Amino acid sequence: MKYQRLFRYLIIISTVLFTIFITTKTQYPQFTFLVLLFVLNVELRSYIKHKNLVLVSLFLDCALVLYMCINFTVYNALFLLVTLEYVLLKLNDEMYHLFIITTLVYLYTLRHSPSYEIGILMIFIYVMISLLIVYLRKELLIKANVENLYDEIRRNHYELDRARNRLKEYSKQVEKVTVLEERNRISRELHDSLGHHLTGVLLQLDSGIQMMDVNKDKGMEIIKSAYQNVNDGIESVRNIVRKVRPVEYQSHQKSVKDLIDEFVRKTETFVQYKVSGNPYELYPSIETVIYRNIQEALTNAVRHGKATHILVHMIYKQNGVEVLIEDNGVGCKELNKGMGLTGIEERLDIIDGRIHYKTDGGFGLHMVIPRREMT
């Protein structure tokens, strides 16, 4: 903007000096008034927002310059270079039409040129200035496009930051939901298993104490049975604790491997565990979903499918993790989703995962989980 203003006044001052040297002193007042009117019109045009008023201002430039060329000197046509600068740099839709009009007015004023040499020089100046302004317009457009691109990049960066923050909050909420889910499940298991054992032990101890006065041997037998039930209860608590993902595990792979080893030890079922791709760390909420869903799938394979051979295949891809679980069980003709499969799907929904089933030739499920790598 500073250089554009400098260009305008350089043209205006140069033209005024040419005219002063050529015209008589008696013409100075009228010429000065017209120059001031031209300058005022140029300055006011910078503040005009309405398109029609801008067009009126440009036509007024042409009229003033044409009048000054006819009554003073042809060099006043150079004032139109200021108009040309505005037309080529400020306008878009009307630029070509006004450029043609300005050029025609400029060429018309050259009719009053004192010689062909001066006329050709004036045309040369007009052409060179026009090319210079067109080049400047292209550079300004490129600069504006680059600035818009930077602005777009900044906006996308801010959006990405906001999305990252929302994802972190979402992950925290998922973890809270998972913790609550596990807490409720453990509460049910404690109630169903340990509560049953303790209730039975309490009844046995009460019966044993009463029986000791009547039949000491029978009373000791009841108390020994209660002792065995206490041991069973302790083992039940240990099993529940083992099902909870240990906090000292360094990765979900070891957690899943230990889960499978424990499952094989307890059920004597052959489980083949495979890992493909390059493993990477996952969000705790995703690790928990993978762990729980594999646990549920293994239990269902033996309990409902009567399977003796199970494949657990974890596949690490660039865009996510896939978990394939297949067994050689009885399969099913129609898929009836019980609490187990429903729980698997609900957990996957929380982390935007998908699942596909295979029901013939045994039973299989294929989980696809989008990648949200820990950073």
Image (cartoon, helix red, strand yellow):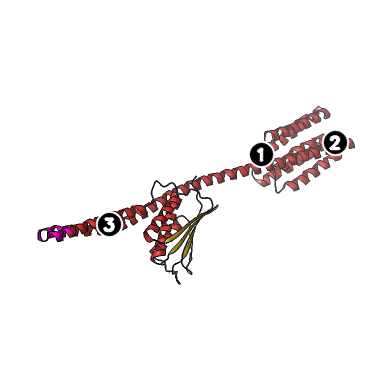
Seen as rendered, the residue at the extreme front is 217
Q: Nearer the viewer, mark 2 or mark 3?
A: 3
Distance CA(mark 2)–CA(mark 3):
111 Å
Q: Disc 1 designates what residue?
A: 46
**Three-letter residue code for mark 1:** Ser
Judge left or right: residue 341 versus residue 13: left
Q: Quadrant of residue 35?
A: top right
Task: Please identify the dominant SS of the magenta region.
Answer: helix
Q: Disc 3 designates what residue?
A: 232
Residue 214 belongs to magenta span:
yes
Q: Earlier in the sequence, mark 1 or mark 3?
A: 1
Q: Disc 2 designates what residue?
A: 121
Check disc 1 and report its element: helix, strand or loop: loop
The total of numbered circles placed on residues is 3
Seen as rendered, the residue at the extreme right is 116
Check disc 2 and report its element: helix, strand or loop: helix
**Three-letter residue code for mark 3:** Asp
**Three-letter residue code for mark 2:** Leu
Q: Residue at x 76, y 41 (%)?
A: 62
Counting from the top left corner in percent of width and height, residue 131 is at 78, 40
Magenta residues span: 204-220
Seen as rendered, the residue at the extreme bottom is 333
Q: Is residue 114 visible?
A: no
Judge left or right: residue 286 versus residue 92: left
Distance CA(mark 1)–CA(mark 3):
92 Å
Distance CA(mark 2)–CA(mark 1):
30 Å
